[in-house]
Amino acid sequence: MRGLVYNGAMNSSSFEILAYESTPLGVLCLRRRELLGQAGTFVTEITLNQEFLMSSYNTDSECALADIALQMHQGNDLSVLVGGLGLGYTARAALQSKRVKQLQVIEFLPQVIRWLKDGLVPLSDELNSDNRLEVIQGDFYEQLSTSPERQYDLILIDIDHSPGEHLDIKEGNDAFYTEEGLKRAKEHLAPGGILGLWSYAESSPFAEALKNVFGEVRVEEINFRNTLVNENHTDWLFFVKGD
């Protein structure tokens, strides 16, 4: 699952539903709550079919996805493609670098894009005011499966829960994680470009597929303490470099 499940009512003193909408993936909810015992600390969360999807509370791994990819690429005037908007933390982390010239986000759900444009998520003002950012509605995996019209220096992916557990968009998700799918995705990288992927779980089969297509694979464990449930948690980031 894309994150940890916990009972919001047990950890909040106030609770507000910002949006509740039907989508092709199911019922999508955007909610905001003030943490019990942390007066003035508000957390924005997304649930899908009443299952916790993502939160503004723990964003270390989403930010690290962009930060590490930028460390791996030494160029300037970088063109960045992000798969999945979410709450915008990966995009914001990339845009904090002055080396990024332009950044395009492809988001499958128009509702999520509208939330950003309408100012409903914490990063709305910051992201909407950055003219380097373009957010478009589309199927990210479908784009990577076709011949590229352009290439990117960084491709950052935060869509599925893990390489073995996908959002139910369509079968194109599954194909991306195969060697053949990765070969097609590789064509979208500019020379020396970096592809990075977020996962809530380790995946040796996916790491092996990456190795067979790209060669060297860098796997990063991002550990953090989720104080809301008093548990340690680990997310996994996979990085490869194009030719």
Image (spheres, rainbow, N blue to C red):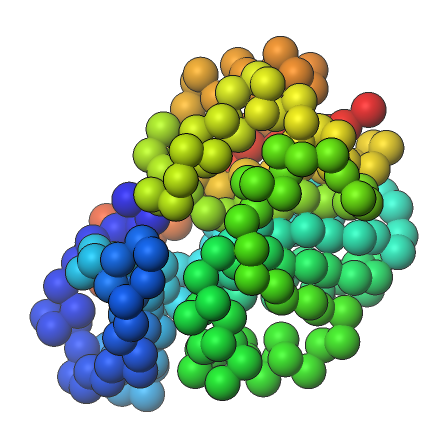
Tell me the quarter of the image containing the C terminus. top right
Tell me the quarter of the image containing the N terminus. top left
Q: Is residue 98 above or below residue 53?
A: below
Give residue 29's position: percent from left, percent from top.
28, 70
Q: Is residue 76 left or right of residue 69?
A: right
Residue drawn 61% across the image and 25% down it? 182
Residue drawn 76% across the image and 39% down it? 148
Q: Is residue 31 above or below residue 150?
A: below
- For the residue pair 75 and 51, the one nearer the viewer reads as 51
Residue at the left extreme of this rendering: 10
Query: How many numbered discs?
Result: 0
Question: Quadrant of the rendered structure where residue 240 is?
Answer: top right
Q: Is residue 125 left or right of residue 188?
A: left
Q: Is residue 173 left or right of residue 34?
A: right
Residue 205, can we see it? yes
Residue 236, can we see it? no
Give residue 200's position: percent from left, percent from top.
37, 40
Residue drawn 69% across the image and 59% down it? 104
Give residue 189's position: percent from left, percent from top.
76, 36
Residue drawn 89% across the image and 52% down it? 76
Question: Quadrant of the rendered structure where residue 97 is?
Answer: bottom right
- For the residue pair 130 and 141, the one nearer the viewer reads as 141
Give residue 155's position: percent from left, percent from top.
67, 44
- For the residue pair 104 and 172, the one nearer the viewer reads as 172
